[in-house]
Image (spheres, rainbow, N blue to C red):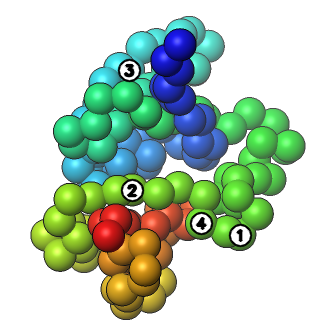
Amino acid sequence: MRQTIARVAILVPDYEEALAFYCGRLGFDLIEDTDLGGGKRWIVVRPRGATETALLIAKAEGERQDAVIGNQAGGRVGFFLFTDDFDRDHAEMLAAGVEFLDTPRHEAYGTVAVFTDPFGNRWDLLQPA
């Protein structure tokens, strides 16, 4: 048996702002953008070169969902963007205006730096060792 995690939902306040960040600044590919009616859309993005796991951009609905935008992992890093060339991607992201919370560091598991999306979610840019 083979299983994969196909989609991970990320709550955002606005579809267009999310697309501007994930596709515009991070360079993710837009896989699907389907109008579901009633102001809802099914939007799927994934990093360049990725073939399996993708983000489902979900517009928050109601106070409960609004309350966790940007804090889906309780203040921890909740998303991990692996790269095969840390220096290249770090430089591209800085040039695109991505906000890093620390300088790159070398750990036993690889080279890493924490960045945030515009909603407050914390991400690792990580080149595994």
Q: Would you name the residue on which mark 1 appears?
A: 75
Q: Is residue 60 left or right of residue 83?
A: right
Q: Position of residue 80 (x, y in %)?
A: 47, 57
Drawn side of residue 30 relative to residue 78, left or right: left
Label 3 element class: strand
Could one spot residue 80 in this view of the protein?
Answer: yes
Query: How many neighbours does mark 3 have within 10 angstroms: few (below 14), some (14-19), or many (20 or more)?
Result: few
Q: Residues within 10 Å of mark 2 (few under 14, many from 20)?
A: few
Amino acid at the residue labelled 1: Gly
Q: Please give the name of the residue rendered at 17% of the width and 65% of the height, measured from the top-left corner.
A: 85
Q: Are marks 4 and 3 in contact (CB under 8 Å)?
A: no
Q: Which mark is nearer the camera, 2 or 1?
A: 2
Picture disc at residue 81: 2
**Mark-to-mark CA distance, 3 and 2:** 22 Å
Q: Which mark is residue 33?
A: 3
The answer to whether residue 99 is visible is no
Earlier in the chain: of badge 1 and badge 3, it is 3
Mark 4 nearby-residue class (10 Å; few <14, some 14–19, many ≥20): some
50 shown above or below 97: above
- What residue is pinned by disc 4? 77
